């Protein structure tokens, strides 16, 4: 597979990139920090990625650069078959309520800019005859909950868009894979108290890869979250209101 | 904030442990780095309760690998397990591995670890080409035999106290297959076991022995010699190598379950099981890291934990020393469930590196407070008198006066440390206990 990964130098993205490298896939890394991209490229080459791993500058905060970055990746790979988006930011509900600018920025990055990036990726995948767009959302998008009211809203909006993308472009050969991890121990969640079912990046990445290979529309990772979120969605509102979950 | 501890689960300390995948950022403050916390005692614990310690395990990228020369450079948090997974299928192996593969490159440098091939390959530090480290004044340096050689030598085996390790460049070993041909043979007492061990080390690259510290009299120290080498790719050794996740030890067993009687029973059973001579083709894990097959086996010792004690004694000068140490253990009911015996080759480059020519013993002792302290004190009296020394990566109970008496190289090492970190800003619970640092 020829894969372009946006923000895969650390965390779940790094773990997924390594699984692709171990399969011998061709990889292009998109991201903000050139030095970090280079270091990750060497890592993936040592782990079996096919040929040289190329790196392309791309910042989730700069949507005007998305198109050129994807073109750069496509040029390096030859043909774009898989685009993975793990780029996102996280902040706690308290932080977001205290800081309106942080709140605006999170909504912009996790909703608007992520969708703008997906649109650019979708256009190129469809034009190239089809492929897979794998986007990391979150279980937080499944139902509004008090500790993730804002973050969850951005992810719910993203899920809605990706759902529509599947309806609109599946016949054109676009496979949309939405990965919904629960709490994962990464740099993004460092210092937060881990809730039940907290996971590590590797099993989440393995579930995501399975989903990509099977063309699964929604991947809960680890899979236990499918059941957990089914239960959460079924919770009567008065109970949800009183719970801290 | 949470309780942290080494592999022996003694001592325990409240600490602020953070994980960072960016070691350049994490090293802006001169805090203690720790890898996967597999040193047994207090080497990876901060100097006082509540202080910070940074886990490097997320900084695990390979930064360069040349399959023609076998030179590999990686971030200090890369684990040996992960390294093996990447390089074994490509015909390379780590040059030196300790008893567990859940250790980081940085940790292996800091402890200057050794393995079954010490007599033929020396310590891990012998195969390190260059280190990138941040010293206490904030500078980032590439150190090697040819650049800041003194700091380099003080850092190999320097227990992370000379600076924070960011990157490690090492020379890998080319191997004919990812499998090993292992041979097992039993010996009736400690003298024949040690003689066989030393004889085998003259011929075979990997040797070690397991010895029964609970058998008495004529069969004192009886044991099993395990030798091996990388297998040529034929027959069974043609299988591809597969990494399996360990089975997890599910619960804390009650402390005290591993007691003298159960240890005797275990040792007798193990001896009976393993004493059949034989040759087998085995995986690197089965050969080098048999206990890694069970995740968190340290839970078998319960909440009170255990201490490991490892010493090396010069056997040429004092042929009776190993038997005397075994007799002390028997007398003080310090039975150990897994006692490893190994002969060492020449001393390495590390200024505080543990191995030196002689015989090393590694014992697991269930932590029973003052009783265990007394066993360690008594062993240390004997080891110090014989001109031996202890392994800091294992130690939790050695007293400062014993350590100072054994470690003739300490003054020279202290001088290098003082030069790079005059205020001892990078320190650990171990450096407080054994070097007299401020907590």
Image (spheres, coloured by chain):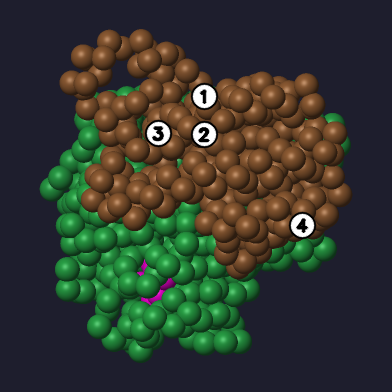
Chain colours: A brown, B green
Q: Nearer the viewer, mark 1 or mark 4?
A: 4
Residue at 18 percent of width and 62 percent of height: B48
Q: Which residue is mark 1?
A: A220
User: Looking at this view, is A212 or B315 the one in front?
Assistant: A212
Q: Nearer the viewer, mark 1 or mark 3?
A: 3
Q: Which residue is mark 2?
A: A158
Label 3 marks a residue whose chain is: A
Question: Do marks 1 and 3 share a chain?
Answer: yes
Q: Could you tell me residue A225's position as x and y percent?
A: 44, 21
Relative to B273, is A65 above or below? below
Q: Secondary structure at mark 1?
A: strand
Q: Which residue is mark 3?
A: A153
Judge the density around disc 4: few (<14), some (14-19), many (≥20) Cα neighbours within 10 Å: some
Q: Secondary structure at mark 4?
A: helix
Q: Could you tell me residue B88's position as x and y percent?
A: 71, 47
* Lower position in the chain sequence, tag 2 or tag 1: 2
Residue at 61 percent of width and 87 percent of height: B146
Q: Could you tell me residue A187's position as x and y percent?
A: 43, 50
Residue at 63 percent of width and 73 percent of height: B129
Q: Secondary structure at mark 2?
A: helix
Relative to B3, is B429 above or below? below
User: Looking at this view, is B361 or B122 the one in front?
Assistant: B122
**Disc 1 from disc 4: Cα separation:** 31 Å
Question: Do marks 1 and 4 share a chain?
Answer: yes
Q: Main secondary structure of the magenta part?
A: loop
Q: Which residue is mark 4?
A: A72
* Lower position in the chain sequence, tag 3 or tag 2: 3
Question: Do marks 2 and 1 share a chain?
Answer: yes
Task: Report the residue that reaches farthest toward the left.
Answer: B370
């Amino acid at each position: 597979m020829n894969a372009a990964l946006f923000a895969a130098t650390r965390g779940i993205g790094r773990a997924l990139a390594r699984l692709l490298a171990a399969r011998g896939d061709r990889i292009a890394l998109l991201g903000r920090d050139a030095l970090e991209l280079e270091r990750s490229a060497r890592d993936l080459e040592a782990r079996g990625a096919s040929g040289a791993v190329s790196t392309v500058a791309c910042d989730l905060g700069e949507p005007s650069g998305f198109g050129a970055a994807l073109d750069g990746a496509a040029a390096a790979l030859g043909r774009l078959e898989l685009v993975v988006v793990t780029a996102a930011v996280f902040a706690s509900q308290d932080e977001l309520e205290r800081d309106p600018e942080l709140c605006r920025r999170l909504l912009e990055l996790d909703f608007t800019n992520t969708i703008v990036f997906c649109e650019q990726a979708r256009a190129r995948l469809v034009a190239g005859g089809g492929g897979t767009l794998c986007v990391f959302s979150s279980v937080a998008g499944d139902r509004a909950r008090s500790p993730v009211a804002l973050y969850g809203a951005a992810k719910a909006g993203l899920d809605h868009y990706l759902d529509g993308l599947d309806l609109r472009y599946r016949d054109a050969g676009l496979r949309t894979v939405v990965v919904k991890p629960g709490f994962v121990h990464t740099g993004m969640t460092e210092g937060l108290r881990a809730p039940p079912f907290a996971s590590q990046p590797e099993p989440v990445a393995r579930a995501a890869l399975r989903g990509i290979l099977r063309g699964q529309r929604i991947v809960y990772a680890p899979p236990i979250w499918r059941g957990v979120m089914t239960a959460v969605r079924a919770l009567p509102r008065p109970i949800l209101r009183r719970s801290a979950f | 904030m949470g309780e942290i501890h080494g592999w022996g689960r003694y001592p325990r300390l409240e600490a602020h442990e953070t994980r960072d995948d960016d070691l350049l950022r994490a090293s802006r403050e001169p805090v203690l780095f720790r890898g996967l916390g597999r040193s047994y005692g207090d080497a990876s614990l901060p100097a006082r309760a509540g202080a910070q310690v940074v886990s490097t395990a997320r900084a695990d990228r390979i930064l360069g690998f040349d399959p023609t020369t076998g030179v590999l450079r990686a971030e200090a948090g890369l684990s040996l397990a992960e390294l093996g997974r990447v390089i074994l299928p490509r015909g390379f192996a780590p040059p030196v591995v300790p008893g567990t593969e859940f250790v980081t490159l940085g940790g292996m440098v800091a402890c200057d670890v050794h393995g079954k091939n010490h007599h033929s390959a020396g310590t891990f530090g012998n195969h390190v080409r260059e280190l990138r480290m941040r010293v206490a004044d904030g500078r980032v340096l590439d150190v090697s035999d040819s650049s800041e050689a003194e700091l380099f030598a003080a850092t190999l085996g320097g227990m992370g106290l000379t600076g924070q390790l960011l990157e490690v460049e090492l020379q890998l070993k080319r191997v004919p297959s990812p499998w090993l041909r292992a041979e097992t043979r039993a010996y009736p007492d400690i003298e024949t076991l040690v003689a066989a061990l030393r004889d085998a080390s003259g011929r075979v690259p990997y040797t070690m022995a397991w010895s029964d510290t609970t058998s008495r009299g004529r069969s004192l120290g009886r044991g099993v010699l395990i030798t091996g080498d990388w297998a040529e790719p034929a027959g069974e050794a043609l299988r591809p190598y597969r990494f399996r996740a360990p089975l997890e030890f599910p619960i804390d067993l009650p402390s005290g379950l591993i007691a003298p009687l159960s240890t005797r029973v275990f040792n007798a059973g193990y001896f009976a099981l393993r004493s059949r001579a034989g040759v087998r083709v085995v995986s690197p894990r089965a050969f080098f890291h048999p206990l890694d097959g069970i995740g968190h086996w340290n839970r078998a010792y319960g909440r009170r934990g255990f201490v490991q004690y490892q010493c090396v004694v010069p056997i040429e000068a004092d042929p009776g020393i190993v038997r005397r140490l075994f007799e002390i253990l028997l007398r003080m009911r310090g039975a150990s469930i897994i006692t490893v015996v190994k002969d060492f080759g020449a001393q390495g480059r590390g200024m505080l590196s543990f191995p030196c020519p002689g015989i090393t013993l590694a014992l697991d002792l269930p932590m029973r407070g003052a009783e265990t302290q007394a066993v360690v004190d008594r062993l240390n009296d004997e080891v110090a008198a014989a001109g031996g020394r202890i392994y800091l990566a294992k130690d939790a109970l050695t007293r400062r006066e014993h350590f100072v008496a054994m470690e003739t190289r300490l003054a020279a090492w202290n001088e290098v440390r003082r030069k790079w970190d005059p205020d001892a800003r990078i320190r650990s619970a171990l450096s407080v206990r054994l070097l007299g640092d401020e907590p």
